Amino acid sequence: MSQLILVVEDEEAIRELIGLNLQASGYTVELAADGTQALTKIKAVRPDLILLDWMLPGLDGLDVLRYLKADPQLATIPVMMLTAKSEESDIVLGLEMGATDYMTKPFSNKVLVARVRALLRREGAAPLEEQIRYAGLTLTPGQRRAELGGAELALTVGEFDLLALLCAHPGHVYTRAQIVARIKGEDYPVTDRAVDVQVVALRRKLGAFGERLETVRGVGYRMRA
């Protein structure tokens, strides 16, 4: 069965064009014109990926994203923001809210399909049985599940990936560029600020355990060995 992608876009011409390009590339596609319709379809079909416009009538893209991340059954669905909002602060906000990827308009449909392929390939790469254990923290990448002292942590996809990378190699220092390359892929357009935002969010969610996530001044980040 082909992977299912939900395209949420209020401009009909753009919505239909994206849908046609994805279908031509072998994906099954559902379309939604606003946030309310998107949430109804997400609950009904549980897509493998959501392409989400930011500026939607009624519930905007961030409202939809906030709802998804608050629901444990939906929080692990990867979301790629598609938006004309291209300022660094907008990108940081989208990623901080839990978006897995962020693409600004206008964009090439070929590039969009390539990014979709890469994202879905990355999401399905980790075996369900694989686990990372570090000082009372257990990460199961295939399920995007994180437990600390037996209690489940509510992490965004980006936060989980960052934590998994650092915990898999305690003591190893990663620069911000290396973090982006390892998690998102080479030449991915994310700023250093976006990495810093995710680190701050992780420390907050980890509580006292977050002290183990160390800043190495002038270099990057590591989990204490």
Image (cartoon, rainbow, N blue to C red):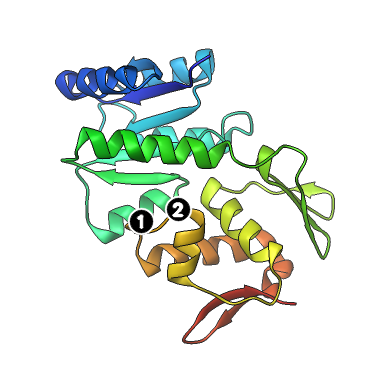
Looking at the rendered structure, the kind of residue marked 2 is: Lys
Are the two marked residues, 2 and 1, in contact with CB atoms closer than 8 angstroms?
yes
Residue sitting nearer the eye, 186 or 192:
186
Circle 1 packing at 10 Å, graded few (<14), some (14-19), many (20+), is: some
Where's residue 155, x and y in %?
61, 49
> Does residue 59 lie above or below 139 as drawn?
above
Where's residue 199, x and y in %?
54, 66
> Does residue 211 lie above or below 48 as drawn?
below
Res 184 label:
2
Does the rendering let one see residue 164? yes
> Does residue 32 lie above or below 67 as drawn?
above
Q: Secondary structure at mark 1?
A: loop
Q: Residue at x 45, y 45 (%)?
A: 100
Res 156 label:
none
Res 188 label:
1
* Horizontal arrangement in the rendering, residue 220 relative to residue 160 (left or right): left
* Horizontal arrangement in the rendering, residue 131 relative to residue 175 (left or right): right
Where's residue 189, x and y in %?
32, 57
> Disc 2 to disc 1, how far (Cα)?
6 Å
Q: Residue at x 51, y 33 (%)?
A: 68
Tell me which corner region of the image, top left, top right, bottom left or bottom right, holds residue 132: bottom right
Q: Quadrant of the C terminus?
A: bottom right
Looking at the rendered structure, the kind of residue marked 1 is: Tyr
Tell me which corner region of the image, top left, top right, bottom left or bottom right, holds residue 127: top right
* Horizontal arrangement in the rendering, residue 41 relative to residue 82 (left or right): right
